[in-house]
Image: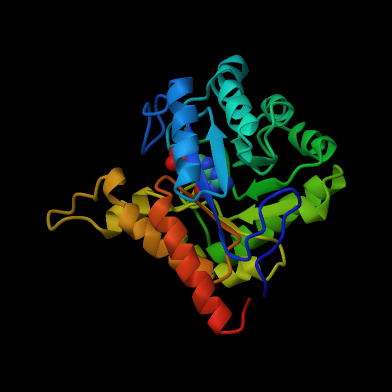
Amino acid sequence: MSAAAVPGLPTPGRCLVMGVVNVTPDSFSDGGAWFDADKAIRHGLDLVAEGADLIDVGGESTRPGAQRVSREEELRRVVPVIEALAAEGVPVSVDTMRAEVAEAAVAAGARLVNDVSGGLADPDMPRAVAAAGVPYVVMHWRGHSHDMQTRAVYGDVVREVRDELLSRVDAVLEEGVDPAMIVLDPGLGFAKHAEHNWSLLAHLDVLRDTGYPVLVGASRKRFLGRLLAGPDGTPRPFADCDDATVAVSSLVAAAGAWCVRVHRVRPNADAVRVAAALRTAAGEI
Ligand SMILES: Nc1nc2ncc(COP(=O)(O)O)nc2c(=O)[nH]1
Protein backbone atom coordinates (compact mmCIF):
# COMPACT_ATOMS: atom_id res chain seq x y z
CA MET A 1 0.00 0.00 0.00
CA SER A 2 1.67 3.28 -1.03
CA ALA A 3 1.88 6.13 1.43
CA ALA A 4 -1.40 8.03 1.04
CA ALA A 5 -1.51 11.45 -0.61
CA VAL A 6 -3.69 13.95 1.25
CA PRO A 7 -4.57 17.01 -0.90
CA GLY A 8 -2.49 20.11 -0.23
CA LEU A 9 -0.04 18.33 2.06
CA PRO A 10 3.49 17.01 1.45
CA THR A 11 3.60 13.58 -0.21
CA PRO A 12 7.14 12.37 0.43
CA GLY A 13 6.33 8.70 -0.21
CA ARG A 14 6.86 7.84 3.45
CA CYS A 15 5.13 8.37 6.79
CA LEU A 16 4.96 12.11 7.51
CA VAL A 17 6.22 13.76 10.69
CA MET A 18 3.96 16.32 12.38
CA GLY A 19 5.86 18.47 14.90
CA VAL A 20 3.87 19.61 17.94
CA VAL A 21 3.80 23.25 19.00
CA ASN A 22 1.48 23.62 21.97
CA VAL A 23 0.87 27.31 22.63
CA THR A 24 -0.46 26.50 26.09
CA PRO A 25 0.66 27.00 29.68
CA ASP A 26 -0.40 23.50 30.73
CA SER A 27 -0.05 20.80 28.06
CA PHE A 28 0.98 17.57 29.72
CA SER A 29 4.49 17.22 28.36
CA ASP A 30 5.70 20.65 27.33
CA GLY A 31 3.19 22.96 28.99
CA GLY A 32 4.47 26.53 29.00
CA ALA A 33 7.62 26.06 26.95
CA TRP A 34 6.07 27.61 23.83
CA PHE A 35 3.34 29.76 25.39
CA ASP A 36 5.01 32.91 24.13
CA ALA A 37 4.16 33.47 20.43
CA ASP A 38 7.71 34.35 19.39
CA LYS A 39 9.07 31.25 21.13
CA ALA A 40 6.36 29.12 19.52
CA ILE A 41 7.16 30.47 16.05
CA ARG A 42 10.87 29.91 16.58
CA HIS A 43 10.22 26.39 17.83
CA GLY A 44 8.05 25.60 14.81
CA LEU A 45 10.79 26.76 12.45
CA ASP A 46 13.35 24.71 14.38
CA LEU A 47 11.17 21.61 14.05
CA VAL A 48 10.91 22.16 10.29
CA ALA A 49 14.70 22.44 10.13
CA GLU A 50 14.85 19.09 11.95
CA GLY A 51 12.67 17.48 9.28
CA ALA A 52 9.02 18.07 10.25
CA ASP A 53 6.67 17.87 7.25
CA LEU A 54 3.86 19.61 9.17
CA ILE A 55 3.63 21.76 12.30
CA ASP A 56 0.60 21.21 14.52
CA VAL A 57 -0.31 24.37 16.44
CA GLY A 58 -2.66 23.99 19.40
CA GLY A 59 -3.96 26.52 21.91
CA GLU A 60 -5.94 24.36 24.32
CA SER A 61 -4.48 21.59 26.44
CA THR A 62 -6.26 18.24 26.13
CA ARG A 63 -4.41 16.46 28.91
CA PRO A 64 -6.61 14.39 31.20
CA GLY A 65 -8.39 16.69 33.62
CA ALA A 66 -7.73 19.86 31.61
CA GLN A 67 -10.30 22.64 31.80
CA ARG A 68 -11.34 24.39 28.60
CA VAL A 69 -10.05 27.80 27.54
CA SER A 70 -12.30 30.45 26.00
CA ARG A 71 -12.63 30.77 22.24
CA GLU A 72 -11.10 34.25 22.41
CA GLU A 73 -8.08 33.00 24.34
CA GLU A 74 -7.60 30.04 22.00
CA LEU A 75 -7.69 32.40 18.99
CA ARG A 76 -5.27 34.79 20.69
CA ARG A 77 -2.82 31.93 21.23
CA VAL A 78 -2.84 30.18 17.86
CA VAL A 79 -3.60 32.69 15.07
CA PRO A 80 -0.37 34.76 15.30
CA VAL A 81 1.74 31.60 15.38
CA ILE A 82 -0.07 30.00 12.44
CA GLU A 83 0.11 33.25 10.47
CA ALA A 84 3.86 33.60 10.98
CA LEU A 85 4.68 29.97 10.21
CA ALA A 86 2.43 29.89 7.12
CA ALA A 87 4.07 33.11 5.92
CA GLU A 88 7.38 31.23 6.00
CA GLY A 89 5.85 28.54 3.79
CA VAL A 90 5.53 26.02 6.61
CA PRO A 91 2.65 23.51 6.17
CA VAL A 92 0.64 24.14 9.36
CA SER A 93 -2.23 22.25 10.99
CA VAL A 94 -4.41 23.68 13.72
CA ASP A 95 -5.24 21.47 16.69
CA THR A 96 -8.69 22.68 17.70
CA MET A 97 -12.20 21.44 18.49
CA ARG A 98 -13.83 24.80 17.64
CA ALA A 99 -15.16 25.64 14.17
CA GLU A 100 -14.49 29.35 14.61
CA VAL A 101 -10.86 28.68 15.53
CA ALA A 102 -10.50 26.32 12.58
CA GLU A 103 -11.92 28.97 10.22
CA ALA A 104 -9.58 31.64 11.57
CA ALA A 105 -6.63 29.25 11.37
CA VAL A 106 -7.32 28.37 7.73
CA ALA A 107 -7.72 32.06 6.94
CA ALA A 108 -4.31 32.56 8.57
CA GLY A 109 -2.79 29.86 6.37
CA ALA A 110 -3.39 26.51 8.11
CA ARG A 111 -3.66 23.63 5.64
CA LEU A 112 -5.26 20.98 7.87
CA VAL A 113 -7.72 20.89 10.76
CA ASN A 114 -6.78 18.47 13.52
CA ASP A 115 -9.92 17.94 15.62
CA VAL A 116 -9.37 15.63 18.59
CA SER A 117 -13.16 15.44 19.02
CA GLY A 118 -13.85 14.26 15.47
CA GLY A 119 -16.54 16.92 15.15
CA LEU A 120 -18.35 16.00 18.38
CA ALA A 121 -17.29 19.01 20.46
CA ASP A 122 -18.60 21.61 18.00
CA PRO A 123 -21.41 20.60 15.64
CA ASP A 124 -20.41 23.45 13.32
CA MET A 125 -16.94 21.99 12.75
CA PRO A 126 -17.68 19.55 9.89
CA ARG A 127 -19.45 22.20 7.83
CA ALA A 128 -16.64 24.67 8.51
CA VAL A 129 -14.05 22.12 7.39
CA ALA A 130 -16.10 21.24 4.30
CA ALA A 131 -16.36 24.92 3.39
CA ALA A 132 -12.64 25.42 3.93
CA GLY A 133 -11.86 22.44 1.70
CA VAL A 134 -8.88 21.33 3.81
CA PRO A 135 -7.88 17.91 5.15
CA TYR A 136 -9.56 16.96 8.42
CA VAL A 137 -8.19 14.71 11.15
CA VAL A 138 -11.07 12.83 12.78
CA MET A 139 -9.73 11.48 16.07
CA HIS A 140 -11.50 8.94 18.30
CA TRP A 141 -12.93 10.80 21.31
CA ARG A 142 -15.45 10.09 24.04
CA GLY A 143 -15.87 13.50 25.64
CA HIS A 144 -13.85 16.30 27.13
CA SER A 145 -10.62 15.77 29.00
CA HIS A 146 -11.91 16.68 32.44
CA ASP A 147 -13.64 13.32 32.81
CA MET A 148 -12.81 11.34 29.66
CA GLN A 149 -11.04 8.51 31.48
CA THR A 150 -14.34 7.52 33.09
CA ARG A 151 -15.40 6.46 29.58
CA ALA A 152 -12.39 4.22 28.99
CA VAL A 153 -14.58 1.09 29.00
CA TYR A 154 -14.42 -1.27 26.00
CA GLY A 155 -15.30 -4.87 25.14
CA ASP A 156 -13.16 -4.90 21.98
CA VAL A 157 -11.34 -1.56 21.86
CA VAL A 158 -9.98 -2.02 18.32
CA ARG A 159 -13.37 -2.82 16.82
CA GLU A 160 -15.21 -0.21 18.89
CA VAL A 161 -12.74 2.57 18.04
CA ARG A 162 -12.90 1.65 14.36
CA ASP A 163 -16.70 1.54 14.37
CA GLU A 164 -17.04 4.80 16.32
CA LEU A 165 -14.56 6.51 14.01
CA LEU A 166 -16.38 5.30 10.89
CA SER A 167 -19.68 6.54 12.27
CA ARG A 168 -18.03 9.94 12.80
CA VAL A 169 -16.79 9.77 9.21
CA ASP A 170 -20.32 9.10 8.00
CA ALA A 171 -21.54 12.08 10.00
CA VAL A 172 -18.94 14.50 8.65
CA LEU A 173 -19.39 13.26 5.07
CA GLU A 174 -23.08 14.04 5.51
CA GLU A 175 -22.03 17.62 6.29
CA GLY A 176 -20.13 17.86 3.02
CA VAL A 177 -16.57 16.92 3.96
CA ASP A 178 -14.77 15.35 0.99
CA PRO A 179 -13.80 11.73 1.78
CA ALA A 180 -10.39 12.40 0.20
CA MET A 181 -9.77 14.90 2.99
CA ILE A 182 -10.38 12.51 5.90
CA VAL A 183 -7.57 11.29 8.16
CA LEU A 184 -8.33 8.91 11.05
CA ASP A 185 -6.61 8.88 14.45
CA PRO A 186 -7.15 6.28 17.22
CA GLY A 187 -6.86 8.96 19.92
CA LEU A 188 -4.24 7.29 22.13
CA GLY A 189 -4.77 8.31 25.73
CA PHE A 190 -8.19 9.86 25.08
CA ALA A 191 -10.72 7.81 27.04
CA LYS A 192 -8.22 4.95 26.93
CA HIS A 193 -6.06 3.14 29.44
CA ALA A 194 -2.61 1.77 28.62
CA GLU A 195 -3.90 -1.63 27.50
CA HIS A 196 -6.29 0.04 25.08
CA ASN A 197 -3.48 2.09 23.55
CA TRP A 198 -1.30 -0.98 23.08
CA SER A 199 -4.12 -2.93 21.46
CA LEU A 200 -4.81 -0.09 19.04
CA LEU A 201 -1.12 0.13 18.13
CA ALA A 202 -0.82 -3.64 17.79
CA HIS A 203 -3.79 -3.69 15.38
CA LEU A 204 -3.19 -0.47 13.48
CA ASP A 205 -3.92 -2.44 10.30
CA VAL A 206 -7.61 -2.41 11.28
CA LEU A 207 -7.72 1.38 10.90
CA ARG A 208 -5.24 1.36 8.00
CA ASP A 209 -7.42 -1.11 6.09
CA THR A 210 -10.38 1.29 6.18
CA GLY A 211 -8.49 2.99 3.35
CA TYR A 212 -8.23 6.32 5.20
CA PRO A 213 -4.78 7.69 6.10
CA VAL A 214 -3.99 7.14 9.78
CA LEU A 215 -2.34 9.66 12.11
CA VAL A 216 -0.81 8.35 15.35
CA GLY A 217 -0.11 10.55 18.38
CA ALA A 218 1.83 8.52 20.97
CA SER A 219 4.53 11.06 21.71
CA ARG A 220 5.56 11.19 25.39
CA LYS A 221 2.17 9.88 26.48
CA ARG A 222 1.53 8.41 29.92
CA PHE A 223 1.28 4.80 28.73
CA LEU A 224 4.89 5.01 27.56
CA GLY A 225 6.00 6.42 30.89
CA ARG A 226 4.20 3.57 32.68
CA LEU A 227 5.88 0.97 30.43
CA LEU A 228 9.27 2.46 31.31
CA ALA A 229 8.56 2.83 35.03
CA GLY A 230 11.46 2.45 37.46
CA PRO A 231 11.89 -0.42 39.96
CA ASP A 232 9.71 1.47 42.45
CA GLY A 233 6.94 1.77 39.87
CA THR A 234 7.41 5.49 39.28
CA PRO A 235 6.52 6.23 35.64
CA ARG A 236 9.31 7.59 33.45
CA PRO A 237 8.89 11.42 33.18
CA PHE A 238 7.23 12.59 29.96
CA ALA A 239 10.28 14.32 28.54
CA ASP A 240 12.27 11.08 29.00
CA CYS A 241 9.91 9.12 26.78
CA ASP A 242 11.24 10.41 23.47
CA ASP A 243 13.21 7.24 22.71
CA ALA A 244 10.12 5.10 23.28
CA THR A 245 8.22 7.52 21.05
CA VAL A 246 10.77 6.94 18.29
CA ALA A 247 10.31 3.18 18.64
CA VAL A 248 6.54 3.63 18.24
CA SER A 249 7.08 5.89 15.21
CA SER A 250 9.23 3.32 13.43
CA LEU A 251 6.78 0.51 14.16
CA VAL A 252 3.62 2.38 13.14
CA ALA A 253 5.34 3.80 10.04
CA ALA A 254 6.32 0.24 9.09
CA ALA A 255 2.66 -0.72 9.63
CA GLY A 256 1.56 1.94 7.14
CA ALA A 257 0.68 4.98 9.29
CA TRP A 258 0.26 8.16 7.23
CA CYS A 259 1.76 10.48 9.86
CA VAL A 260 3.15 10.53 13.39
CA ARG A 261 2.55 13.50 15.73
CA VAL A 262 5.65 14.08 17.83
CA HIS A 263 7.40 16.61 20.10
CA ARG A 264 10.99 15.67 19.13
CA VAL A 265 11.27 15.70 15.35
CA ARG A 266 14.81 14.71 14.30
CA PRO A 267 14.89 11.15 15.73
CA ASN A 268 11.33 10.46 14.59
CA ALA A 269 12.11 11.77 11.11
CA ASP A 270 15.01 9.30 10.99
CA ALA A 271 12.76 6.50 12.25
CA VAL A 272 10.11 6.97 9.56
CA ARG A 273 12.82 7.01 6.88
CA VAL A 274 14.13 3.69 8.17
CA ALA A 275 10.58 2.33 8.03
CA ALA A 276 10.21 3.61 4.45
CA ALA A 277 13.43 1.87 3.41
CA LEU A 278 12.17 -1.34 4.94
CA ARG A 279 8.71 -1.04 3.29
CA THR A 280 10.38 -0.25 -0.04
CA ALA A 281 12.60 -3.32 0.22
CA ALA A 282 9.51 -5.36 1.02
CA GLY A 283 7.81 -3.95 -2.07
CA GLU A 284 5.07 -2.34 0.02
CA ILE A 285 5.70 1.22 -1.26
N1 LIG B 1 -4.63 14.14 16.13
C1 LIG B 1 -4.18 14.17 17.42
N2 LIG B 1 -4.09 15.35 18.07
C2 LIG B 1 -3.65 15.37 19.37
N3 LIG B 1 -3.59 16.55 20.03
C3 LIG B 1 -3.16 16.59 21.32
C4 LIG B 1 -2.76 15.41 21.95
C5 LIG B 1 -2.29 15.46 23.37
O1 LIG B 1 -0.92 15.49 23.40
P1 LIG B 1 -0.11 16.87 23.58
O2 LIG B 1 -0.69 17.51 24.79
O3 LIG B 1 1.28 16.43 23.74
O4 LIG B 1 -0.30 17.69 22.38
N4 LIG B 1 -2.79 14.21 21.31
C6 LIG B 1 -3.25 14.17 20.02
C7 LIG B 1 -3.34 12.94 19.28
O5 LIG B 1 -3.02 11.85 19.78
N5 LIG B 1 -3.81 13.00 18.00
Relative vertical location of residue 133 with respect to residue 284 in this rendering, above or below: above
Q: Horizontal placement of 224 versus 132: left or right?
A: left
Q: How many marks?
A: 0
User: Which quadrant would the C terminus be assigned to in this image?
Assistant: bottom right
x then y, percent, for residue 117: 62, 41
Location of residue 167 (image quadrant): bottom right
Indicate whether 156 appears above or below 118. below
Place of residue 113 in the rendered image (x, y in percent of width and height, measured from the top left): 67, 39
Pick the front one: 63 or 24 = 24
* Residue 24 falls in image quadrant: top left
Q: Is residue 225 left or right of residue 83?
A: left
Residue drawn 18% across the image and 54% down it: 233
- Quarter of the image containing the N terminus? bottom right
- Residue furthest to the bottom in view is 282
Residue 74: % across, % down: 57, 21
- The one of 44 and 74 positioned closer to us in this rendering: 44
Residue drawn 43% across and 38% down? 64
**For residue 160, which quarter of the picture?**
bottom right
- Which coloring applies here? rainbow
Q: Residue at x 25, y 45 (%)?
A: 237
Residue at far left of view: 232
| Residue 237 appears anywhere in the view | yes
| Closer to us: 104 or 116 | 104
Residue 248 at what x, y percent from top left? 42, 63
100 horizontally vs 20: left or right: right
Task: Please indicate, yes or no, whether residue 62 appears anywhere in the rendered image.
Answer: no
